[in-house]
């Protein structure tokens, strides 16, 4: 019987890919340890390596931390106004 399709979180994928990049264990052992297929781990590893250069790309902040998208801290006055 087939196992239902699973959706893994980005944090889980990053953790597994980093373990694969470290190379301390073969992909087959990582696949058993994390209960995913070795081919999937290899794909996540390739995706991580491909996207890693964006972290150091010309000193620009990542898109989600741009100043206009950050939330403003709420003050006590803001909380009282909503009540």
Image (cartoon, rainbow, N blue to C red):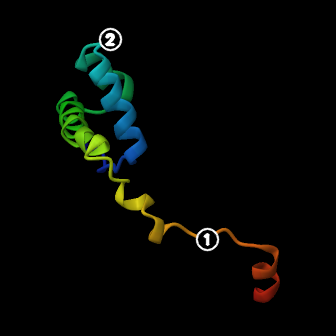
Name the spot of residue 58 as percent of width and height, x first: 26, 47
- In the image, taking residue 15 as reference, residue 72 lies left or right, namely right
Image quadrant in which you'd find residue 72: bottom right
- The answer to whether residue 3 of the structure is visible from this angle is yes
| Horizontal side of residue 15 vs 51, given as left or right | right
Q: What x and y, as percent, mark residue 11?
A: 42, 42
Taking the spot 34% from the left edge, 39% from the top edge, the residue there is: 13
Instruction: In this rendered view, identify the residue nearer to me: 57 or 11.
Output: 57
Q: Residue furthest front?
A: 59
Nearer to us in this view, 34 or 16: 16
| Residue that badge 1 annotates | 72
User: What's the CA distance linking mark 2 and mark 1?
Assistant: 43 Å
The residue wearing badge 2 is: 24
Q: Quadrant where the C terminus lies?
A: bottom right
| Above or below, comparing residue 76 to residue 31 in the picture | below
Look at the numbered disc 1 and give the secondary structure of its residue: loop
Q: Nearer the viewer, residue 81 or 47?
A: 81
Q: Please report whichever mark, 2 or 1, sits nearer to the chain's N-terminal start.
A: 2
């Amino acid at each position: 019987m087939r196992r239902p399709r699973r959706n893994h979180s980005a944090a889980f994928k990053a953790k597994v890919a980093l373990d694969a990049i470290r190379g301390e264990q073969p992909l087959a052992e990582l696949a058993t340890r994390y209960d995913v297929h070795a081919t999937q781990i290899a794909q996540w590893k390739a995706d991580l390596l491909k996207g890693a250069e964006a972290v150091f790309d010309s000193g620009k902040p990542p898109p989600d931390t741009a100043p206009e998208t950050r939330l403003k801290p709420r003050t006590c006055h803001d909380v009282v106004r909503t009540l």
